[in-house]
Image (spheres, rainbow, N blue to C red):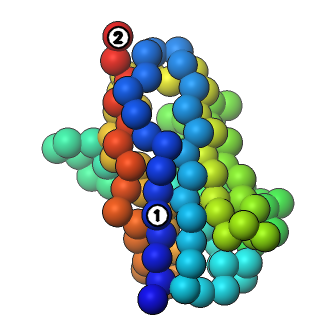
Amino acid sequence: QVQLVESGGCLVQPGGSLRLSCAASGFTFSIYAMSWYRQAPGKERELVARIGTLGRITNYADSVKDRFTISRNNAKNTVYLQMNSLKPEYTAGYYCSVPTRNDWGQGTQVTVSS
């Protein structure tokens, strides 16, 4: 079965950095684009970044440009989200997905607070 397992979320101070990972299995990872979404309490789920199959094409939400970097390692079936200069408003559950398959992970919580 398709599995997407996020990890790396934790409590971090404003201005800090964090790297999230999403380990994929159960499908041919290298032929699918991947995305990261986030959802804060009381808010809609928001697309924050996506990456093409070879890792050459990337897109970001305006709110995280120049702060977040999405990458992937097809040999390890893993997609990453490097988050720098974190703000309290970035606090949310973060989820990876395979958009064309409508597959989602269970999420990992990121809390930015002093």
For residue 53, which quarter of the picture? bottom right
- Amino acid type at mark 1: Val
- Tell me whether circle 1 and circle 2 mark residues in contact (CB < 8 Å): no
For residue 55, which quarter of the picture? bottom right
Name the residue furthest left: 42
The C terminus sits in image quarter: top left
- Amino acid type at mark 2: Ser
Image location (x, y in percent) of residue 102: 43, 80
Q: Which mark is residue 5?
A: 1
The answer to whether one can see residue 72 in this image is: yes
Name the residue furthest top: 114
Residue 57 vertical placement versus 112 (above, below): below
Residue ID at (43%, 16%): 13
> Between residues 58 and 28, which one lies in front from this camera angle?
28
Residue 42 vertical placement versus 65 (above, below): below
Spatial separation of the CA atoms under disc 1 and disc 2: 28 Å
Numbered disc 2: secondary structure: loop
Numbered disc 1: secondary structure: strand
